[in-house]
Image: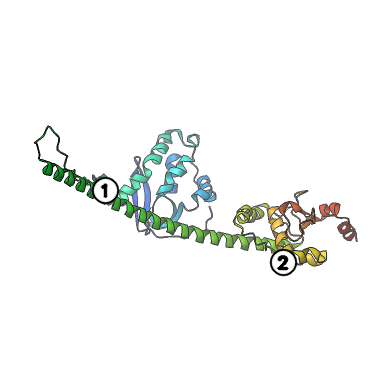
Amino acid sequence: METSQILITPDKQAMVRIAGYEVLSICMANGNIGAGVRMICDLLGVDLRGQMRKLQADPAFRDSLVLAKVEIAGKQRAAYFIIAEFIPLWLKEIHPSKVAPEARETLAEFQRVAVQTLRAFFFPETKAQQQSAPPKEPTPTPLPTPDETALSLPETLQAVGMHIIQKNQQLETRLTSVEQENLELKMRLASLEQENQMLAARQISIDHQQMDMVAWMTEKGHELHLQAQQITAVTTRVEHLEASGETGVPQPSPERLHALRTMPYQEYLQTPEWQARRRLALRRAWYRCQTCNDTKMPLYVHHRTYERRGCEEPEDLFVLCASCHANYDPQFAAKRQK
């Protein structure tokens, strides 16, 4: 259960009764609350290590785990906690057949009440506010009817005018409240979008660093065999990079494209445009020969066609190992025999 999470110290820790069971829970400085993963797994009779691996590997639960320093049996220990809002999502992924038979009702009860119970325990004032009845709106003065006290025309008009004014005031109050809520939501959305952009930029930067590292290994390693899990970790986001236009392949101008297509082929192979497309082709092929699936280095990027030289499409290029390349390129085969 290795992780790169930072050990934090919560503001509060307590044993909270959820669905009839005491569960070690914490409240953090940022207002997040969480429950102990080990205790929940023990109550349900499921494997702790298997659940931790599942949570850490699933992108949907990437931010759900917190490693916190808590006091257990009089000693300071590090334990994993899952943020309250993720508890129903996590427990929904656990099939009842994987849970001890006597704990299946507990599984359903935890999904239903865990979040509300934790929030009510750590933030009782919020619960009190939710339970309090909303303030009643003032009831507008009803319009007089013909069966009631007979009024003169001026009195009737005055009553109608007062009724309209009161309804107007009610609408203005509700409109002001809605506008304020809308403004708060817009500010929150802008903040989330900014955070998302920062995270996306950071992820793209990490992707490029990792892929450049593997490209360097393929250039310098020659006989190096890359492990399958290393290749997978580096190349699984190639489609995301291509969709976002962050592939690192420069787009040549018409003049530059003409120069690329007319220069000698060996000179073209040294240009940054070709080197970038070559690296992208290797990443797209997961650094494997696309004929025999071998990862033995070096790998060669073979042209199926030269019609679009300088701005090759993905289908124009083919990644081959040395043996397979010799079958496609007679000149390369002759050099290899020598």
State the residue lying farthest toward the front. 153
Asked which secondary structure carries label 1, the reply is helix
**Residue 271 higher or lower than 46, as above or below:** below
- Residue that numbered label 2 is attached to: 272
The residue nearer to you, when weighing 56 against 174, is 174
Graded by Cα atoms within 10 Å as few (under 14), some (14 to 19) or many (20 or more), the crowding at tag 1 reads: few
| Amino acid carrying mark 1 in the image | Leu
Query: Residue 285: image x %, image y %?
Result: 71, 52
Q: CA–CA distance between discs 2 and 1?
A: 65 Å
Residue 234 picture quarter: bottom right
Badge 2 vs badge 1, beta-carbon distance below 8 Å: no
Q: Is residue 231 above or below residue 47?
A: below
Mark 1 lies on residue: 171
Q: Nearer the viewer, mark 2 or mark 1?
A: 1
| Residue 12 drawn above or below residue 103 | below
Screen quadrant of the C terminus: bottom right
* Residue at 70 percent of width and 65 percent of height: 253
Q: What is the crowding at mark 2: few (fewer than 14 residues within 10 Å), some, or many (at least 20)?
A: few
Check disc 2 and give the amino acid type.
Pro
Q: Position of residue 277 (x, y in %)?
A: 71, 60
Q: Residue at x 81, y 56 (%)?
A: 322
Of callouts 2 and 1, the N-terminal one: 1
Q: Is residue 269 visible?
A: no
Residue at image coords 54%, 61%: 201
Q: Which of the pair 284/222 is nearer the observer?
A: 284
- Measuring from the top left, give residue 37's x and y in whole percent: 44, 48
On the question of residue 120 being in view, the answer is: yes
Question: Does dot 2 land on a helix, a strand or a loop?
Answer: helix
